[in-house]
C-alpha cells in the first residue's frame, strides 16, 4: 500500500507540473494572439502603396464634380491610368446619359399621373393616346410603326443633336454643352460662378 501511495504522489506531482506549465503557457499564447491580431488590424488600415495610377487619379481630383460629401468618387476605377481625353469622354457620356435618365423619369411621372396627348396614336388601329398605359406596359399597346418612329427619333437625336458640336456648330464651352449655337435658355445671362454652380448641381 505504501508503494501504491508513493506512485499516486508521483503522478499527482507530475500532473501538478503539467497544470502549472499549461497555466503559464496560456497567457503567453493569448498575448501572442492579441499582438498578432493588432498587427493584422493595423496592416488592414495602413495606406496602400500608390503607383503611377494614383498619380494619374490626382490629376482629376480638382475637376468639376469632385465635391462634398464624396469628393473624387470613382468606385469602379474607370479613371485608373486615364488621360484627359478619356476623362472628357467619360464625362460626356455621364452627362448625356444622366440627362436621358432625367427625361425618362419626367416622362414616366407625366404618364403615371394620367396626362396624355389628345387624339390617336394609331388611326388605322383606332388606338388613342389615352389607351396607352404608363411604364413598360406601353410597349405592348404601341403599334410596331409607332415604336419604329420612337427609336428612329432617338437615333436622330443621338446622331445629330445630342453632341458637343453638331451640324457644323463650334464646340461648346465645356463637356456637355449641347447648345450647338441654337438653344440657349438664358445660359449667357449667368455669371461664371453661377454657371459653375449649376453644372456642379447637375453632376
Image: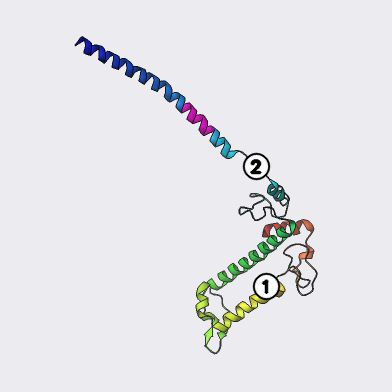
Magenta: main secondary structure = helix
Q: What separation in Å lies between label 2 and label 1 (alpha carbons)?
A: 42 Å
Q: Residue 49 has which mark?
A: 2
Report the front residue among 73 and 23.
23
Report the front residue among 107 and 168.
168
Quadrant where the image shows the N terminus? top left
Task: Say if 27 sits above or below 147 in the image.
Answer: above
Quadrant where the image shows the C terminus? bottom right
Task: Give the residue furthest to the front.
Answer: 3
Q: Residue 20: x and y, percent?
A: 38, 19
Indicate whether residue 10 is drawn in magenta: no
Task: Say if 19 sits above or below 101 in the image.
Answer: above
Task: Say if 126 sits above or below 111 in the image.
Answer: below
Report the front residue among 142 and 25.
25
Left or right? Give the position of 4 relative to 152.
left
Report the front residue among 77 and 92.
77
What are the residue bounds of the magenta stretch? 30-38
Q: Nearer the viewer, mark 2 or mark 1?
A: 2
SS type, badge 2: loop
Task: Give the residue furthest to the right.
Answer: 170
Which residue sits at x=70%, y=50%? 57
Left or right? Give the position of 10 relative to 24.
left
Give the residue number, with chain letter if any, for mark 1: 158
Crowd band around label 1 with a 10 angstrom C-alpha radius: few (<14), some (14–19), many (20+): few
Which residue sits at x=75%, y=59%? 195
* Residue 150, picture quadrant: bottom right
Amino acid at each position: 500500500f505504501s508503494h501504491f501511495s508513493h506512485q499516486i504522489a508521483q503522478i499527482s506531482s507530475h500532473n501538478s507540473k503539467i497544470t502549472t506549465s499549461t497555466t503559464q503557457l496560456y497567457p503567453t499564447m493569448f498575448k501572442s494572439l492579441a499582438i498578432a491580431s493588432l498587427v493584422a488590424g493595423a496592416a488592414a488600415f495602413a495606406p496602400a502603396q500608390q503607383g503611377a495610377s494614383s498619380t494619374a487619379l490626382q490629376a482629376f481630383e480638382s475637376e468639376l464634380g469632385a465635391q462634398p460629401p464624396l469628393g473624387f468618387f470613382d468606385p469602379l476605377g474607370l479613371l485608373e491610368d486615364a488621360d484627359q481625353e478619356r476623362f472628357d469622354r467619360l464625362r460626356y457620356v455621364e452627362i448625356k446619359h444622366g440627362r436621358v435618365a432625367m427625361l425618362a423619369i419626367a416622362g414616366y411621372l407625366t404618364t403615371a399621373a394620367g396626362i396624355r396627348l389628345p387624339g390617336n396614336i394609331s388611326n388605322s388601329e383606332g388606338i388613342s393616346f389615352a389607351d396607352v398605359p404608363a411604364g413598360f406596359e406601353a410597349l405592348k399597346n404601341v403599334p410596331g410603326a409607332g415604336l419604329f418612329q420612337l427609336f428612329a427619333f432617338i437615333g436622330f437625336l443621338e446622331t445629330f443633336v445630342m453632341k458637343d458640336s453638331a451640324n457644323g456648330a463650334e464646340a461648346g464651352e465645356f463637356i456637355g454643352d449641347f447648345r450647338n449655337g441654337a438653344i440657349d435658355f438664358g445660359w449667357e445671362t449667368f455669371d461664371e460662378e453661377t454657371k459653375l454652380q449649376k453644372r456642379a448641381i447637375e453632376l
